[in-house]
Image (cartoon, rainbow, N blue to C red):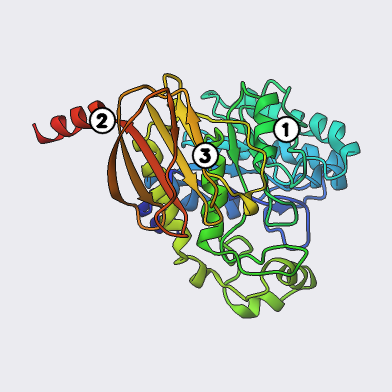
Amino acid sequence: MADKRASQGFTVYQTNLRSDFHEHSRFWLTRPDAEHPIPSPAVFAEEIDRRMHYLADLGLVNALGFAWGSSMESEGDAFGAAMTLAEQNTLARYGTLPVVWTIAVEASAYDPSRCDFLASALSEVAKTVHELDIYHYPVTVHSANERPFSDCFYDKDWYSFTLDQAGHGDFVVAESDYRDYLAKHADKPFVEGEALYEECSLLEENGPCRIDATMLRRVAYLTMQLGDAGYTYGAQGIWDNIWSEEDLKKTSSVRMMAAIFNRYGVAWTEAIDSPGAKQMGIRRCFFEEQEWWTLEPYGQGGSALLGRKTPLAAKNADGTHVVAYYAATTRRPLAVDGMKDESWVLRWFDPATGTYSGEEVRQMSGGRMRLPDKPTMDDWLLVLTRADSIFSKRMEQTQ
């Protein structure tokens, strides 16, 4: 999996030690003279070390998580003390590798009354990381799926960026949720950490369906057009560690999760070749070419993702470069203001194949352009670039 993701252009590989106290955990050793378990040196030396170094050798940043957020509440002080030992062990072993520290996952407040407790408890964990990590790598928390997006940890000094979870259809993934959050918290990077994992059972009220690459692309491009600094791809069967279809029947908890998220019996050997992963590599290359860090969300918007009717545009500050995403549902026009009055080149980009087509030159006047209709009913991106900059770039490439 690591080899394939690196070849597809991924930059970060998310892992989690799941070092919670539970019956299946092999991370912990108990001793008669200790108040709580200690991390197992053998498990780290024989299994985890080689995996962590393998990711680093591939050039991947490891977004390394410690445990499940709810463990802080269910296990209490003993878990906090054990987590300190786990962190000391983990940072000593992997602190010189390229890492993002994910303090916990599913860690914001499904129940808002838990927010203060979680923020306090996880801040103690983060404090240990901050004291031991001499490189001061980014630190975050993988949020739970809730609306509005959680800002439970936002005001903490150790919290480097927001790692949100838009979920898998139990809430509508709406443009307005991202706009509202970024309007409130514009001074910190935002990464969509879990949304519409490919092959997952979509949790819609009118009945589940299988999430495909087109649905995945919608939320992946929506978030980027709205100022996202990164996106997490996931696939069912990998997400829930399913080696074969028989694994779906092993325990009651696995059977319950399969009934919710893996109704189609997808194992990792099938999921690894799902087309959406390659298309996320295409997405990365596309936005790097567009210098995504110069683009800002355009307009006010507010529609829901799965019902979006108009293109979603982003443009740079001086009005010389525009990118518009047309979802498969897009069928209404959009006019973009604040553009330079000169000749523009319009090109269509296919996010499924990574190819351009249909180049057209238009003369702008009045600083406003009505974007054209998309060429087919599929999803597309429209790139608008000043003709003189396109000409200059092509001259540079031929010299």
Counting residues from the N terminus, which is met first, the one under dot 3 or under dot 1?
1
Whether residues under marks 1 and 2 lie with C-beta atoms below 8 angstroms apart, the answer is: no
Q: Of the numbered discs in the image, which one, if any, rests on residue 16?
A: none
Q: Quickly name the residue at label 1.
A: 125
Q: Residues within 10 Å of mark 3 (few under 14, many from 20)?
A: some
Side (left or right) of 71 relative to 351: right
Along the line of sight, the residue nearer the viewer: 77 or 38:
77
Q: Residue at x 36, y 57 (%)?
A: 353
Along the line of sight, the residue nearer the viewer: 258 or 320:
320
Q: Mark 3, mark 1: which one is toward the viewer?
A: 3
Amino acid type at image mark 1: Val
The answer, for residue 323, to whether it is visible in the render is yes
The answer, for residue 45, to whether it is visible in the render is no
| Residue 57 horizontal/vertical position (percent) | 38, 45
Whole-angstrom CA distance, mark 1 to mark 2, is 53 Å
Taking the view exactly as shown, the residue that stands out farthest to the front is: 366
Q: Quadrant of residue 63?
A: top right
